[in-house]
Amino acid sequence: MSRNKIHVKTDDQVYVLTGKDAGKTGKIIAAFPATGRVIVEGVNIATRHVKPRSQHQQGGIIRQEMPIDASNVMLVCQKCKRPSKTGRKFLENGDKVRYCKACGETVSVIRKGKKG
């Protein structure tokens, strides 16, 4: 199932709703809108055993964040400091912005309005 839009983006602070890491917060490292998944710092850690492939490469156990579905995270508002739903709206100057539905504060500008 492919989605084109997700409600969060890279560098957003998010709260994990479900799964083994439910209740944790972290920053989004990468977002993949085509698959609707995100990688959150310190969440969904997988352990990989890596064999050295050359004489100078180090082998060992690597702990790595794996993607989780974007629907399982909720944006943490910077003003009210709690997880909240986000919405999109147009301002008077034509800017399209994301906003916190709990406090009404603007989270980020999606697209600048046309100057005219």
Image (cartoon, rainbow, N blue to C red):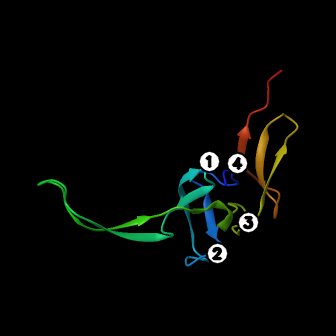
Q: Secondary structure at mark 4?
A: loop
Helix, strand or loop at mark 3? loop
* Separation of marks 1 and 3 at Cα, in angstroms: 30 Å
In this rendering, position of residue 47 left or right of residue 91: left
Mark earlier in primary sequence (1, 2): 2
Which residue bears the numbered disc 1?
Answer: 34
Mark 4 vs 2, N-terminal side: 4
> From the image, which quarter does the C terminus lie in?
top right
Q: Which residue is mark 3?
A: 80
| Dot 1 alpha-carbon crowd within 10 angstroms: few under 14, some 14 to 19, many 20 or more | few
Looking at the image, tell me whether mark 4 or mark 1 is earlier in sequence order: 4
Circle 4/circle 2 CB separation < 8 Å = no
Q: How many marks?
A: 4
Q: Secondary structure at mark 1?
A: loop
Instruction: Single out the mark in the foreground, 3 or 2.
Output: 2
Report how far apart the C-alphas of labels 3 and 2 lie in the structure.
22 Å
Q: Residue furthest left?
A: 55
Please name the amino acid that badge 3 sits on.
Answer: Cys
- In contact (CB < 8 Å): disc 3 and disc 2: no
User: Hey, what amino acid is under mark 4?
Assistant: Lys
Is the residue under label 3 in contact with that under label 1 (CB below 8 Å)? no
Q: Which label number is shown at residue 18?
A: 2
Q: Would you identify the image quadrant in which residue 96 lies?
A: top right
Residue identifier under label 4: 5
- Of residues 65 and 48, the one nearer the viewer is 48
